[in-house]
Image: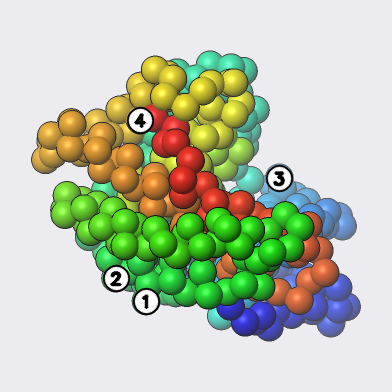
């Protein structure tokens, strides 16, 4: 995948333009900046905590590979307004967004109580069900298309990208695993076909839904940080969510707790589909999602930023998970 152009976030002219945009956007909401911004920079985005006279706001500038997030935020605010933060402003062309503060995250309040996920996951499933009839709007906004029928070709392209896979290099894909993945392509294509046969409509798929990306408020849960998202089989979400729960709680794959959380999520579809079929589809979707994760990391790292090397192993790492056991 070729490197794509991203503005130099350290350029004073870029900073001045972004600060002016933030100030104008806040002014339209009757707010003003009251102090210096606090930056956090990653190869895929720059985030500022902006102090204002009505509490902090959050500015985000995405790199070219994740620029679609600003447009996606605006669409989700229209399609699922109770489940995401309503942006104060977005500039889809530049990949800029300005959000109000969302309060504490699920990670801040979880304190080991995994039953909270049994309420969070149905709320997230409701977002996906609400968005599914309008995925054409997300695709038009530039959200990557990872629907099952496209995934075999996307895997082929990824296997041809030796640079992204760090093929034969430290922390990269070994030639042996690369050959095994190539030989596995027909089976992967069959998995994708079987997944599509269940007929569950594609929807937005967060692809990084863990306890740090959910706000908890009296009015309910708000889902944020959509820079890894795609239009995909909705159940693919479970890969990262259940892996993160398992990691945090020290649970092994197949632990009954993970099965209970999977079923809490799937309950939203039981009106139309048999539970056994839903569980089978979830297992297949989590397998396909390993390739989706590798693709999202490749997009995020399509930048000349020297710091990208710190994260580059994520692309071959996730692709290698194709042969790992499913969390549930």
* Residue shown at the point (76%, 57%) measured from the top left: 170
Q: Give the labeled residue for mark 4.
A: 262
Front residue of this view, candidates 98 and 105: 105
The answer to whether residue 116 is left or right of residue 307 is: left
Asked where in the image residue 55 lies, by quadrant, the reply is top right
Front residue of this view, candidates 34 and 109: 109
Earlier sequence position, callout 3 versus callout 2: 3
Asked where in the image residue 2 lies, by quadrant, the reply is bottom right
Earlier sequence position, callout 4 versus callout 3: 3
Pointers 3 and 2 in contact (C-beta within 8 Å): no
Q: Give the labeled residue for mark 1.
A: 140
Task: Residue 55: give its label.
Answer: 3
Task: Residue 136: give its label.
Answer: 2
Q: Is residue 201 visible?
A: no
Pointers 2 and 4 in contact (C-beta within 8 Å): no
Earlier sequence position, callout 1 versus callout 3: 3
Pointers 2 and 1 in contact (C-beta within 8 Å): yes
Question: Where residue 137 sits: x, y (%)?
Answer: 33, 70
Earlier sequence position, callout 2 versus callout 4: 2
Sort mark 1 into few (<14), some (14-19) or many (20+) by Cα contacts within 10 Å: few
Gap between marks 2 and 4 measured at Cα: 27 Å
Q: Nearer the viewer, mark 3 or mark 2?
A: 2
């Amino acid at each position: 995948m070729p490197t794509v152009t991203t503005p130099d976030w350290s350029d004073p002219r870029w900073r001045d333009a972004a600060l002016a945009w933030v100030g104008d956007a806040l002014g339209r909401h009757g707010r003003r900046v009251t102090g210096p911004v606090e930056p956090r920079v990653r190869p895929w985005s720059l985030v500022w905590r902006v102090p204002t006279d009505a509490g902090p706001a959050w500015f985000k500038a995405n790199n070219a590979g994740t620029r679609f997030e600003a447009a996606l935020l605006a669409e989700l605010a229209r399609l699922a307004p109770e489940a995401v933060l309503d942006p104060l402003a977005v500039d889809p062309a530049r990949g800029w967004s300005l959000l109000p503060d969302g309060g504490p995250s699920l990670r801040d309040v979880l304190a080991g109580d995994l039953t909270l996920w049994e309420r969070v996951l149905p709320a997230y499933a409701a977002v996906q069900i609400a968005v599914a009839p309008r995925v054409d709007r997300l695709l038009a906004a530039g959200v990557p298309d990872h629907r099952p029928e496209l995934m075999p070709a996307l895997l082929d392209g990824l296997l041809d990208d030796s640079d992204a896979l760090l093929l034969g290099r430290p922390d990269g894909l070994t030639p042996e695993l690369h050959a095994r993945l190539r030989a596995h392509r027909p089976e992967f294509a069959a998995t994708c076909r079987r997944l599509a046969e269940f007929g569950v409509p594609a929807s937005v798929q967060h692809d990084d839904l863990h306890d740090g990306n959910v706000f908890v408020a009296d009015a309910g849960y708000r889902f944020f940080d959509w820079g890894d998202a795609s239009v995909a089989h909705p159940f693919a979400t479970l890969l990262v969510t259940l892996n993160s729960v398992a990691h945090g709680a020290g649970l092994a794959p197949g632990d009954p707790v993970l099965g209970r959380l999977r079923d809490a999520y799937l309950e939203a579809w039981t009106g139309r589909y048999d539970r056994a079929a839903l569980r089978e589809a979830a297992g297949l979707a989590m397998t396909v999602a390993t390739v989706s994760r590798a693709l999202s990391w490749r997009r995020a790292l399509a930048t000349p930023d020297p710091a990208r090397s710190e994260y580059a192993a994520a692309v071959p790492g996730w692709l290698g998970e194709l042969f790992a056991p499913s969390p549930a």
